[in-house]
Image (tube, rainbow, N blue to C red):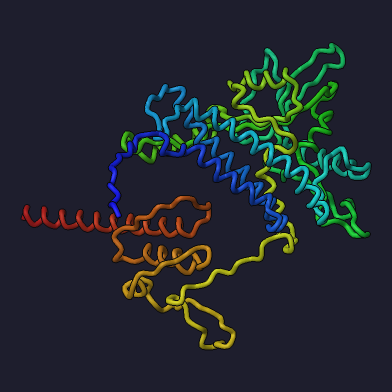
Amino acid sequence: MPRLKKTSSTIDLSDPQYYFNRELSWLEFNNRVLHEAFDPRTPLLERLKFMAIFGSNLDEYFMVRVAALKEQVEAHVSKLPPDGRTPEEQLDLISLRLRPMVTQQHRHFEQALRPQLAAKGIYLLDYMDLNQEQRLYMQRFFEEQIFPVLTPLAVDPGHPFPYISNLSLNLAVVVKDSETQEEHFARVKVPNVLPRFVPLPPDLRVHQKGRPAVWTGVPLEQAIAHNLEFLFPGMNIQEYYPFRITRNNDLGVEEDDAEDLLQAIEQELRRRRLGGSVVRMEIQASTPESVRETLMREMGLIERDVYEIEGLLGMKDLMSFMELPVPNLKDNSWMPVVPPRLRRISETDADSNLLEIEDGEDFFSVLRRGDLLVHHPYYSFPATVQRFITQAAHDPDVLAIKMTLYRTSGDSPIVSALISAAEMVSRLLCWLRSRLDLTKKITLTGHES
C-alpha cells in the first residue's frame, strides 16, 4: 500500500476570513439571551426577566461599544480589527443584524408574554383599556404623585432644544394654542423617581373568578400622556409620541497619560453623569416624519441610529415584575453549598445535616493543604471568595491583594474589604512616617550634642 505524501500548507493568520467580528459576535450572544425568553420550559416571569436583560444589555452595548465605533469613525481610525471591517461597516452590519432581533423581542412580548401574564393574573393594561373608575383613580394619582415632579419644556425660537439625559424615556408633545392656533413642540420627561408601571389598588384590579388579580396597572408614560391637559392649560393637545435615547457613556481614562489618575477618573465620572453624544434613539413606529426629523436634527442622528418600536419602550424595566409574590412563575431558589473542606456537620444537630463554616480555622491553612477550586453559583460566595478576601484584607502578613473586579454593587462586601485593607495600609504608613521622623529627630539631636 503506497504511503500518502504529506503536503505542507501555510495558513495566513492575518486573513480576515479566520476571525469573527467582536461586536457582531456579541450581538449573537445577546440573541441567545433573548431566546431564553422564548423557551416555554422557562417559568413565565423568568422569561420576562430575560426579555429585560436583553434590553439592558443593549443599553450598555450602545453606550460603550457602538459609541466607541462612532468615535473611531469621527477620528478616521485607519487600523482595522482582525476581521478587516471598518468602523463604518461594523455600524451598518450592527444595524442590519439588530433590527430584526428588536422587532422579534417586541412582537413576542405583545403577542405571547403579555397574554400569558394576563392568564396568570398579571395585567399590564393600556390606558385606553381602563374603565371609568380606574381612570378616575389614575387621574388622582397623576395630580398627587406625578404632576409635581414633571417639568414640560417647550421648544421655540426663545427656548432651545432641551438636554435629553441618557436612557431617559420622554414624550414628544405637539400642542396648539387655542387662541392663535399656532402649533408648539414640547418635551416631557418621564420621571425615573416613580415606578415605571403604575399599579392599581386591589379593589380596582381586574377580577378573576371573583377575586382580584395578582397585579393590574399601566405604564407610567401612558398615565402622563392621558393627562397632558394639566401640563398645558389653554392648549389643545394634538399628539404625543414616546421616545428614548442612549448616549455615549464609555469611561475613557488613559492611565499612562494622566498626571493625577484620581483626578482624571473624577473628571471622567462627572462627564459620564452628563453623558456624551447621542448614539441611539428608540421611537414609536407611528411617530410622524415631522416629529421624527425634529428629534433627529436636534440630536445629530442619522437613520441608522433610529430604531422604530411597536409597543413598549425601555423593556429593561420589566425586571420589576420579578418582585411579584408568585413563586410558581419563577425558578426555584438555589441554596449554594459550602465546599467540604470549609464546612463541618454541626455537632449539636448532626441529624439535621446543617452545615456550618468552621470559624476557628484559618483560611490560609486550608489553602496550604492544597488548592481549592470553587464554582459559583453552586458554591457559596460568602463562604469562599468573600471570606478569603476579607481575611486577607485584615491579615498584617498580606503584602498585596491583586484581583480583577469585573462588576460589583454599591454595597459590595468585597469593596468594603478592599477599603479596609487600604485604610490599614494608610494607618501603617502614617505610623512608619512618624517613627522615621522621630528617629531622624533623635539622630540629629545626638549629632548636635
Q: Is residue 197 left or right of residue 49?
A: right
Observer-nearest of 11 and 21 = 11
Query: What residue appears at the point 58 percent right and 40 percent down from the top-left corner?
Result: 58
Query: What residue appears at the point 80 percent right and 32 percent down from the top-left corner?
Result: 225
Query: What residue appears at the point 42 percent right and 38 percent down from the top-left corner?
Result: 19
Q: x%, y% of residue 160?
A: 64, 18
Q: Look at the picture and state if 175 lies above or below 44.
A: above
Res 310 quadrant in image: top right
Q: Look at the picture and state if 355 lies above or below 419.
A: below
Q: x%, y% of residue 114?
A: 78, 47
Q: x%, y% of residue 325?
A: 74, 61
Q: x%, y% of residue 221?
A: 76, 37
Is residue 260 visible from the viewing direction of this image?
no
Q: In this view, does 278 lie to the left or right of 198?
A: left
Position of the N terminus, as image quadrant, is bottom left
Is residue 214 visible from the viewing direction of this image?
yes
